[in-house]
Amino acid sequence: MNTESFALRHIGVREEDLQKMLEIVGVKSIDELIDQTIPEDIRLKEGLSLPQALSESEFLKFIQNLAEKNRVFKSYIGQGYHESVIPSVIKRNILENPGWYTAYTPYQAEIAQGRLEALLNFQTVVCDLTGMEIANASLLDESTAAAEAMTMLFDLRARDQKKNGVLKFFVSEEVLPQTLSLLETRSAPLGIELVIGNHEKFDFSSEFYGALLQYPGKYGQVHDLEDFIAQAKEHNIKTAVATDIMSLVMLTPPGEWGADVVVGTTQRFGIPLGYGGPHAAFFATKAAYKRNIPGRIIGLTKDTDGNPALRMALQTREQHIKRDKATSNICTAQVLLAVMAGMYAVYHGPKGLKHIANKIHEYTKTVAQSIEAFGFEQLNTVYFDTIRFKVENVHSIRTISESKGINLNYIDDETISISLNEAFTKKDIRPLVNCFVESQALDDDGGIVEYEGQVIPKKLVRKTPFLEHETFNSYHSETDLMRYIKKLERKDLALNHSMISLGSCTMKLNAASEMLPLSWSNWGNIHPFVPVEQAEGYQLVLRDLEQQLNVITGFAATSLQPNSGAQGEYAGLMTIRAYHQSRGDHHRDICLIPSSAHGTNPASAVMAGMKVVVTKTDEQGNIDVLDLEEKVKEHSDNLAALMVTYPSTHGVFESSIRYITKLIHDHGGQVYMDGANMNAQVGLTNPATIGADVCHLNLHKTFAIPHGGGGPGVGPICVAEQLKPFLPSNPLIATGGEKGITAISSAPWGSALACLISYGYIKMLGADGLTDATKIAILNANFIKERLNGAYDVLYTGEQGRAAHEMIIDCRPFKEKGIEVTDIAKRLMDYGFHAPTVSFPVAGTMMIEPTESESLAELNRFCDAMLNIRQEIEQVSAEDANNVLKNAPHTLAMVTSDEWSFPYSRKKAAYPLEYVADNKFWPSVRRTDEAFGDRNLMCTCPAIEEYAEA
Ligand SMILES: *Cc1c(COP(=O)(O)O)cnc(C)c1O
């Protein structure tokens, strides 16, 4: 046994167990199983052409060397990104803690109260600072949040638009360039016309449905927006304001002027720059728009006993139900980063935040005055942290700055802006000022001018208190915060407790060696808009990762820009759109999507300006080829694309896939493959081989980026040669194809920091390890299938009776016993397990995906739990709902209560199998009441009295 092999650590099944498992599955070898699972005609003939695996220690040395190739400058570039100071207590206890980073989106609220509370804190921070009524938890980046504002306001006025042709959206010229680029991308397919201009000269005409302003503006000028917002309101124009969260500690928030939406990023609340991400963006709006808000909102409700409990609110808005009518395609968000930013506010509290904002502002004034003292003209009359100078010799200032390891924002040939941040200290003043002084060959007379006056007029100074809630005024020592974080962590079930077999989500190991580099400042502290030469380490990693993904998918090129799978879908469809348009096929706008597709597919297609045509599924769960043929022929002239998930969301490798992709090509369409199930393909087949043209990969599923409780994600797209020219660009840093579409994300390479994880995963597994991982993932799924055989029906299998890497079990027959799939999900908690995916893609079912990282022992514990639950179902009757399934989950409070009135024992409730006692997990609340919370939406930290009422 080679104990240095990472594959040995990543893959859970031990060699000595393999034979036992193969016997149960009924094959002689794993290759025999794979032959029975994946159709012959799409199998790869050769192994992946990737370098040999590195051991963990080799990888750490290797990545350390690359880290040293990044040159960490003092970056005063601003533009929506600022160096921040991560409190070590948050770094160690959240960012570096699998209890937080390996959890999934809190679908099972009873075992997710910890991160739900942390997200409620985040929403409270956002609402308080922006002056708005409700906020979500969270969006992918500031620019996408701004685009979501543009589209939400558009949808709000959809009826007017049809009647009156109100399609114009005003964008202030002071909006960040990356945001503007993204608005261009997102507006075009919807027919929204962007009008860019000076908001002070805006002529309020009724052709506009909305407007976006930036506060402070992109070069730091703080405008009083009260009049604009008021006038817009008079003209029935809705306003969105993109803002800087730190500045709102000192400035009057746009919410107080009546803005309809306020967006921004929380990066500077203790999140590393990471060469562009991941960071949590926020979206805050009025309560009246609660049903239109994109993304997830955490809300308060009550549990079975009437105790307060949190859960994701208004779930019916999700794409799974609304599909092509969904408000947005956002699925994976930025939960881990939102948790951290919220915790930053908890740690500092209102007083601490004021100290930080004030310090930044005072230093900015000092730097401004000190440079002005040498005769330079500072152009911002009102500013928070960003000043702007008119200079004669940008070039020489740049040369001097770079020689001092300083980056400024070089706006044009005669203007420079400087943005200060929390990390700025007194020692940084002199070198910064000297960049200007030396460029003029002026004598440095040693003067640092501390300016005592006010640069923010009284009217713009924030007067409203914020973060008065107890949570933000209780944990200001490290001991207290450490314990608060632990208290929340204990309420959540994550991968460090037990297997999370969420089908389609691929909850595999997120190895410590993959995660370690994320804590290093040479990766963390790089601004996304530095000259690429400064980020050589990153450039090498990103290029290499793109190349690895090309090899794995069989495609020609990769863009790492999308920050989630759904964003990848959108990006991929937009490249298809650009391809058709480049050939003059502007009319091709039909997107075929099988009914079993993930809800983000239709939502993304609509965003890309396509019309969704749903195709049927046959009884075996495969694409109904006859129906598909009919629809392809019917729409032949206008066919843009087929979106297909492979292996399908039914957990099957459809054998007709090559026929299907050819059919689409024959009719002029392109094939988009949803790569969420790539864990069943790597090394054995690939999207190019099945005949797709583009796919996204969820690096946070197949390639080991942790789910973070619902994000971050990285959703790169890989494309065939003909789509390569259209890969997304960035307005500030050259990236993407020659005819690249405009931006999909704020940053040129999306969430570059998180890419290090997938890079480590591929580097340490190598070609063989990656392929073995796929094989074992398929073996583990088929092992569960065999063990559950007879107790649960598996809905769909391949032609030879095999599952792919996941399977769907049918829970609908138990309805005659009064048992719903939810009851099984909740009962699993009593056994210490997180439920598999519930009711996707088929209502009333569970989709189980064990992944390769689980051992035989853990698979057996899970199967034992499922089989025991099956017996419990036998024992209940539909007439009496007072049973162990309906009452699940059972909390510690119930089981230790002086009273016990249930018709089964406490032991049966809490320790239904022997192994449970050894590693008991206690759900912290009883079943949450969805309807109550939706009727009484409350999504900021409640006052104590409100808790009492709930
Ligand atoms: C997870 C998933 C998506 C969406 O990916 P996100 O990263 O959550 O946006 C799309 N399709 C399928 C089949 C998925 O499982």
Image (cartoon, rainbow, N blue to C red):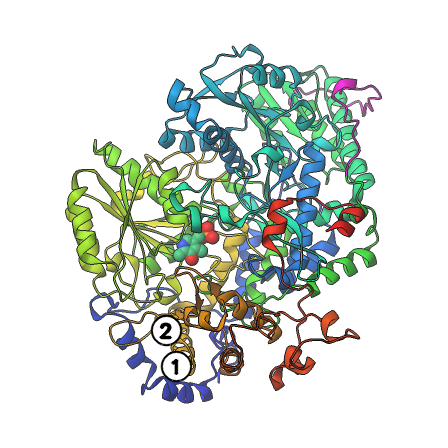
Asked if ligand 1 lies within 8 A of label 2, the reply is no
Chain-order first, disc 2 or disc 1: 1
The residue type indicated by label 2 comes to Val
Asked if 229 appears above or below 572 in the picture, the reply is above
User: Is the Cβ of the residue at disc 2 closer than 8 Å to that at disc 1?
Assistant: yes
Q: Nearer the viewer, residue 238 or 533?
A: 238
Q: Main secondary structure of the magenta part?
A: loop
Q: Identify the residue at the far front of this view.
A: 879
Quarter of the figure with residue 659: bottom left
Give left or right: position of 655 versus 435.
Answer: left
In space, the residues marked 2 and 1 are separated at their CA atoms by 8 Å
The residue type indicated by label 1 comes to Asn
- Label at residue 789: 1
> Within the displayed image, which quadrant is ligand 1 positioned in?
bottom left
- Looking at the image, which residue is at 76% across and 49% down? 949
Q: Give residue 720's position: percent from left, percent from top.
A: 27, 49
Q: Nearer the viewer, residue 426 or 284?
A: 284
Q: Which residue is mark 2?
A: 794
Q: Nearer the viewer, residue 654 or 54?
A: 654
Q: In what element is the residue under mark 2?
A: strand
Q: Is residue 698 visible?
A: no
Q: In what element is the residue under mark 1?
A: loop
Which region of the structure is painted magenta? 439-466
Asked if ligand 1 lies within 8 A of label 1, the reply is no
Asked if 165 appears above or below 434 in the picture, the reply is above
